[in-house]
């Protein structure tokens, strides 16, 4: 059995398909095709972070809270999404798909690993970064997928404005990274 | 001909690349650095950067999700 896995690990088709990373162009073509499929099947352009806000609302409601009066969820569309439930939301499915797809690809490449946390600093940066990203994405009505990627392919000017702002943010982020993590 | 080890385990992109760039600056021609990484995107961008610089690069998968990128400063 072990020799079978050893042999498979060296098989050139396995290595090309599952092990080696795609080229940037290859990834871009796959993204382009898959987002068309998503738009055609769900009627909405691809988004990621909006769904997390809904997940938050569902968790809050499961704990006995209510978001009916919240301005963010006041539109009819938002209420419908929430009333349809977690499992009937296409956004939930695509986000779960990303999480389990990423897990599957790491497992298939035999690269799954629990990584150790090197420094408390990483935890603080991850939590702060996550909060800023989540808050910013909801203020901008989209993240780098919904507002940037889907914005630009919908020929919307807002996507380009978002992209320019991303560059500024990445520049500042790069400086902070050097300042706090390159000691 | 000195050999250095750069421990980038548990560090996410782009830190392994930034640290590698900094390390290469400090090294003399002929020196070798072994960059230890466990972040798959560093397995792509570190060797890519080094090859673009014209350095000799070898990647060794030492364990599941762990790599050593061996870079020789050739110029």
Image (tube, rainbow, N blue to C red):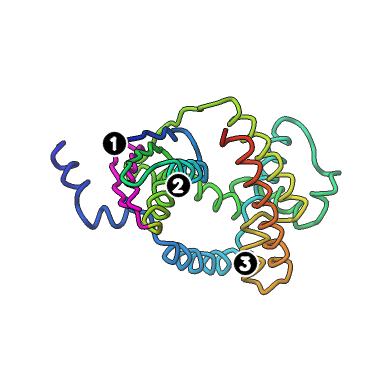
Residue at image location 78% in from the left, 33% down from the top: A65
Residue A155, position in %: x, y? 67, 74
Residue at image location 65% in from the left, 69% down from the top: A152
As drawn, is B22 to the left or to the right of A132? Answer: left
Whether residue A35 is situated above or below residue A179 in the rendered picture: below
Residue A100, position in %: x, y? 46, 45
Closest to the observer, A5 or A179: A179
Quadrant location of the C terminus of chain A? top right
Asked if the stretch drawn in magenta spans residue A94, the answer is no
* Residue lying at the far bottom of the rendered structure: A155
Label 1 lies in what chain?
B
Label 2 lies in what chain?
A
Observer-side mark, 3 or 2, equals 2
Q: Which residue is mark 3?
A: A43
Residue at image location 75% in from the left, 55% down from the top: A140
Query: What segment is highlighted magenta in the picture?
Result: B54-75
Asked if the stretch drawn in magenta spans residue B58, the answer is yes
Q: Which residue is mark 1?
A: B62
- The answer for how far apart the CA atoms under marks 1 and 3 are is 45 Å
Query: Both on one chain, marks 1 and 3?
Result: no
Residue A112: quarter of image:
top left
Closest to the observer, A146 or B11: B11
Count up the numbered dots: 3
Q: Mark on residue A102?
A: 2
Whether residue A8 is situated above or below residue B7 in the rendered picture: below
Quadrant location of the N terminus of chain A? top left
Determine crowd level at label 3: few under 14, some 14-19, many 20+ residues with C-alpha closer than 10 A.
Answer: few
Label 3, secondary structure: give it. Answer: loop
Residue A131: quarter of image:
top right
Label 1, secondary structure: give it. Answer: strand
Q: Nearer the N terminus, badge 3 or badge 2?
A: 3
Determine crowd level at label 2: few under 14, some 14-19, many 20+ residues with C-alpha closer than 10 A.
Answer: few
């Amino acid at each position: 059995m072990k020799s079978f896995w050893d042999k498979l690990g060296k098989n050139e088709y396995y290595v090309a398909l599952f092990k080696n990373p795609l080229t940037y162009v290859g990834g871009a073509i796959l993204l382009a095709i898959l987002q068309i499929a998503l738009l055609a099947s769900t009627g909405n352009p691809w988004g990621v972070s909006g769904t997390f806000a809904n997940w938050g609302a569902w968790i809050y409601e499961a704990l006995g809270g209510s978001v009916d009066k919240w301005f963010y969820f006041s539109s009819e569309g938002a209420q419908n999404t929430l009333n349809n439930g977690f499992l009937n939301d296409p956004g939930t499915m695509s986000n779960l798909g990303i999480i389990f797809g990423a897990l599957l690809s790491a497992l298939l490449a035999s690269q799954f690993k629990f990584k150790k946390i090197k420094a408390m600093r990483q935890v603080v940066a991850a939590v702060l970064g996550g909060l800023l990203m989540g808050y910013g994405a909801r203020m901008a009505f989209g993240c780098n997928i919904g507002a940037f990627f889907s914005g630009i392919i919908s020929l919307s000017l807002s996507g380009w404005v978002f992209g320019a702002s991303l560059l500024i943010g990445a520049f500042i982020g790069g400086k902070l990274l050097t300042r706090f993590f390159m000691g | 001909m000195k050999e250095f080890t750069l421990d980038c385990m548990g560090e996410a992109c782009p830190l392994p690349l930034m640290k590698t760039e900094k390390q290469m600056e400090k090294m003399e021609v002929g020196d070798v650095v072994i960059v230890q990484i466990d972040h798959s995107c560093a397995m792509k961008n570190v060797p890519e950067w080094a090859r673009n610089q014209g350095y000799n690069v070898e990647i060794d998968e030492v364990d599941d999700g762990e790599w050593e990128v061996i870079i020789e400063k050739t110029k």
